Amino acid sequence: MAHQADAKRALDERGYQGVLIRGDNPLKLFEKPVRDRIVDSYYWKEQCFGLNAATLLDRAVELSFIGGTYGIAQKPTPFLCLAFKLLQITPDREIILYYLEHAGDEFKYLRALAAFYIRLAWEKDEEVYTTLEPYLADFRKLKRRTRESWTLTHMDEFIDDLLVKNRVCATTLPKINPRTFLEDEGKLEERVSPLGEELDELDRDDDDEGERSEGEVEELEVNGNGHQDSDSRRSAEDDEMNDAD
Amino acid sequence: MSERKGAYGAKSASDTSFRKTWDREEYAAKAAERDQKAKEEGKARHEAAAAGKKYIRRASTPEDAKDTEARKARLNVADQVGKTQLVAAGAGQGKRGKSAGFYCDACDLTFKDNLQFVEHLNSRQHLVATGESGEVRRATLDEVKERFEYLKRKREEEKARETVDLGTRIQVAAEQAEREREEKRRKRNEKRRKTKDGKGVEEIKVENDGIIC
Ligand SMILES: [Zn+2]
């Protein structure tokens, strides 16, 4: 089994014969202008040519930030290019899970990359939730390149973004049913937050001491989707940038 | 017309003779360079064998010839940075032979910038010339695991080296600081011991637990 060294053939509209995701060429999960910028980028031409799921690791472990496109020319980040490469080679599911679970412990940007891919490429909503949610307990820092600058985020926030936002890293995410809907349908169990115990403890502490500041409690509130509400940590300015990137 | 003259009035007509020589020299230089490269690789191979290791040309990939593989390292663009090179006008699509710029050995073509060079390396023309299919073999989970373990090891080794480096640097800095302290102490003492008549330090001895006599 083999795939092409670049995406030329896969991007040729006249007769795509590869793997379909959501009934279409997976590369089309990225919008046309973004696709064009990726395949025109030097990083893509030099670093992504000829990668397979094993050699892609060489590049992924070098990642030092996430992000979509940046600068006036809207250059794609290496993160975005590698995500595109993954869509081109559509590695076996077990490989993606290996990236996410095992290799991701060591290399956090690889975990972020695998999570992004899963959110884009996996078709069963409930699997996306159950596979990604454990990493809402991964609080490692991630650097994010925005259109004009840099911001700091965390793995849990990034995962949360993937599950609740429409647009992440210059990409419109495929539609996903809200968690509560899937729970009502009986497709998902209610999520027990790993913070649950801590929340209880916090409540107890509150009762005991009665002097904890509002802000601290607010950080740990749980939103309607059963995810930790990370928005409270983020500034409004940052949100604005998320839409732009 | 009496006799043919060279462009610079030389008696002999062979005004291109110098050029032939130059070509020969260039080819000789090229060959020497190739030999040198082969020698270096041979040496690396030998050293690796002596150390009981397998020589791997570049870290990343198993030695399959047919499939197209990812580049093992960044293209060495930095080498060219800051160098002024004269490039023939319109050399955009690659120029036959080796000249200033980025040279492809397999195709004997020179490109004026790294973008054109990398585009060439990805091109069908180049793949055919190097006997590659342009197809990449899919990796198995085991290969992915192996690659990951290798990269993890590599990173740990780098970290360890950095730690050693840091340790060495700290030690060196400490020794340096100690030397500086000593020097200061010496100067201070010298100043303090200097007598009014300027006879200096040698007349004053420190004896009996530092009591100055
Ligand atoms: Zn070539």
Image (tube, rainbow, N blue to C red):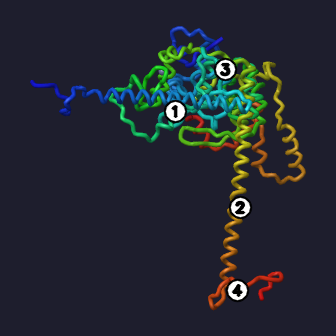
Q: Nearer the viewer, mark 1 or mark 2?
A: 2
Residue highlighted by disc 2: B175
Same chain? Circles 2 and 4 = yes
- Specify the amino acid type for callout 2: Glu
Q: Whole-Å distance between the Cαs marked 1 and 4? A: 76 Å
Mark sitting on residue B203: 4
Residue with the most extreme bottom position:
B197
Label 3 near label 4: C-beta < 8 Å? no
Q: Nearer the viewer, mark 1 or mark 4?
A: 4
Locate residue B164, reporting x and y percent.
Answer: 73, 47
Left-right relation of B63 to B134: right
Q: Whole-Å distance between the Cαs marked 1 and 3? A: 23 Å
Going from N to C along the chain, the mark reached first, 2 or 4, is 2
Q: Residues within 10 Å of mark 4 (few under 14, many from 20)?
A: few
| Quarter of the figure with the C terminus of chain A | top right
Going from N to C along the chain, the mark reached first, 1 or 3, is 1
